[in-house]
């Protein structure tokens, strides 16, 4: 049985096991490595001695292991964050499948403009994707714009184009503001019950599970695992 793991903090909500088993068509021995602080986490190379074929990383540790891994992709080096690792000989190789998945999905949008909420790792991933694809975007985050629920979003959303608003804020932030009806709220915080009310709003709501599923496929490819 394949042994995979996810490393992060407060990750009991994770649906990664479900995603991998759906893609692979088989049961996966999946482990949630839940740590409160970076200091508690063993060296990554030592974690791989436990038999993991692949390890994923989520909030808040995506920047924590850069000095322990080898990154062969210049764009991932630019992002400065990783979310997928494998052991190869004496090295641990790493990449960022969030970036790969985000790029594939963003390319499917047409006649749209983009608005990012937040300034963390996922926000940076989307900014790099938009710059690579030559797409314009705006970013709103609390340190510069204050309470994001008090913003008049009419001032940031086009009346002619569909606006894709990408929520990259941490799960500590609950969105409660009004949005124009021509907005798609794309929520990177999947399975986040405090946002259930947004599913009934006048604007479109979409969880980030589409990105989660696609990045899982890219991760399996990075680990050289193919569906049965």
Image (tube, rainbow, N blue to C red):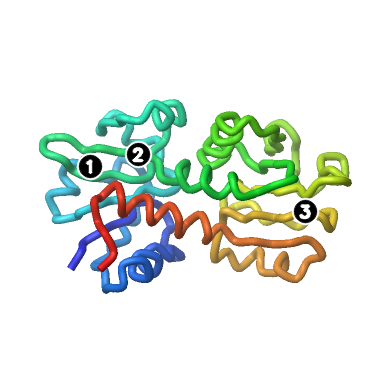
Question: CA–CA distance between discs 3 and 2?
Answer: 31 Å
**Which residue is located at x 75 percent, y 71 percent?**
200
Q: Earlier in the sequence, mark 3 or mark 2?
A: 2
Residue at the spot of label 3: 183
- Give the left or right position of residue 25, taking residue 104 as reference: left
Q: Earlier in the sequence, mark 1 or mark 2?
A: 1
Q: Position of residue 65 (x, y in %)?
A: 31, 36
Q: Position of residue 73 (x, y in %)?
A: 35, 30
Pick the front one: 199 or 131: 131
Question: CA–CA distance between discs 3 and 1?
Answer: 41 Å
Residue at the spot of label 2: 95
**Which residue is located at x 45 percent, y 26 percent?**
78
The circle on residue 8 is: none
- Location of the N terminus by quadrant is bottom left
Residue at the spot of label 1: 44
- Give the left or right position of residue 126, taking residue 81 as reference: right
Q: Position of residue 168 (x, y in %)?
A: 60, 46
């Amino acid at each position: 049985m394949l042994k995979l793991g996810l490393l992060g903090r407060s990750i009991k909500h994770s649906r990664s096991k479900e995603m991998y088993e759906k893609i692979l068509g088989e049961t996966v021995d999946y482990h949630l490595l839940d740590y409160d602080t970076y200091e508690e986490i063993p060296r990554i190379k030592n974690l791989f001695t436990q038999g993991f074929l692949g390890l994923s990383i989520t909030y808040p540790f995506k920047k924590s292991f850069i000095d322990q891994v080898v990154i062969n992709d210049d764009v991932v080096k630019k992002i400065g964050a990783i979310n997928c690792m494998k052991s190869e000989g004496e090295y641990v190789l790493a990449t960022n499948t969030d970036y790969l998945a985000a790029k594939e999905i963003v390319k499917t949008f047409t006649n749209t403009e983009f608005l990012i909420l937040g300034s963390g790792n996922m926000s940076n991933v989307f900014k790099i994707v938009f710059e690579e694809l030559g797409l314009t975007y705006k970013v709103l985050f609390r340190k510069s714009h204050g309470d994001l629920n008090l913003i008049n979003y009419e001032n940031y959303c086009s009346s002619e184009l569909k606006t894709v608003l990408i929520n990259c804020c941490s799960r500590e932030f609950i969105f409660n503001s009004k949005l124009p009806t021509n907005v798609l709220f794309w929520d990177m915080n999947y399975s986040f019950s405090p946002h259930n009310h947004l599913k009934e709003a006048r604007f479109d709501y979409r969880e980030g599970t589409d990105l989660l599923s696609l990045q899982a496929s890219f991760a399996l490819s990075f680990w050289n695992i193919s569906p049965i």
